[in-house]
Image (cartoon, rainbow, N blue to C red):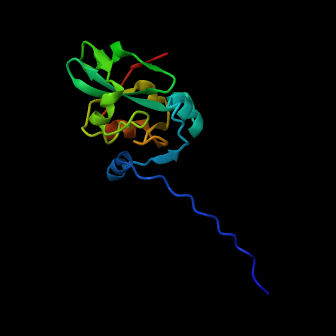
């Protein structure tokens, strides 16, 4: 008598390893890659939060900023917040900071808009993480490509980026 029929399921491909993920691997940092469907019309962080099933306060967007004294720096704030430019200027030792034009982001970071990770940028830039990140066991940041997020402990993110916590989000 034949045995039970076994139905083979197609194995879901695991997410592609990005430079950011490889850097975390090299540093021995535990993380999860979470993929989502990209909507080119809506690359907003609140949309990403909904797609990956996390609260907007726990999903952090990465912004590329230029200071009048420090040059380029990276800031991460919750999806539902706005960057407080004055607070970031003060925290980073600048008189003034401004967002880098989108057309410069790829050349500076190696990442495209909607896929900028604070980990694995072309050059290591000073990194500032909104202090509310510490309220969570894990937060989400871009993995370095649209459609994939890194879920990791905020202290691990701060450690691998040599980052500083500061109050830079408002709203």
Q: Is residue 10 left or right of residue 17?
A: right
Task: Tell me the quadrant of the picture where the N terminus can be found.
Answer: bottom right
Q: Residue at x 43, y 26 (%)?
A: 77
Q: Residue at x 64, y 65 (%)?
A: 9
Residue 8 position within the rendered picture, expressed as x and y whole percent measured from the top left: 65, 69
Farthest residue, direction bottom:
1
Residue 48 makes an appearance in the image = yes
Residue 137 position within the rendered picture, expressed as x and y whole percent measured from the top left: 49, 37
Q: Is residue 167 left or right of residue 6?
A: left
| Of 105 and 88, the residue lying toward us | 105
| Of 39 and 147, the residue lying toward us | 39
Residue 33 position within the rendered picture, expressed as x and y whole percent measured from the top left: 48, 47
Residue 134 makes an appearance in the image = no
Compared to residue 40, the image places residue 16 above or below, namely below
Q: How many marks?
A: 0
| Of 93 and 64, the residue lying toward us | 64
Image quadrant where residue 126 sits: top left
Q: Residue at x 40, y 33 (%)?
A: 113
Image quadrant where residue 89 sits: top left
Compared to residue 67, the image places residue 51 above or below, namely below
């Amino acid at each position: 008598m034949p045995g039970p029929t076994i139905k083979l399921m197609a194995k879901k491909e695991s997410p592609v390893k990005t430079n950011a993920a490889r850097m975390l691997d090299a540093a021995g940092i535990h993380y999860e890659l979470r993929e989502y469907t990209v909507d080119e019309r809506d690359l907003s962080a609140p949309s990403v939060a909904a797609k990956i099933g996390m609260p907007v306060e726990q999903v952090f967007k990465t912004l590329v900023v230029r200071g009048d004294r420090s040059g380029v720096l990276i800031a991460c704030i919750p999806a539902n917040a706005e960057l407080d430019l004055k607070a970031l200027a003060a925290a980073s030792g600048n008189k003034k900071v401004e967002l880098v034009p989108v057309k410069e982001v790829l050349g500076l970071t190696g990442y495209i808009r909607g896929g900028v990770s604070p980990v694995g940028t072309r050059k290591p830039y000073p990194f500032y993480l909104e202090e509310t990140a510490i309220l969570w066991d894990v937060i989400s940041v871009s993995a370095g490509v649209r459609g994939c997020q890194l879920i990791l402990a905020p202290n691990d993110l701060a450690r691998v980026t040599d980052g500083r916590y500061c109050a830079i989000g408002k709203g």
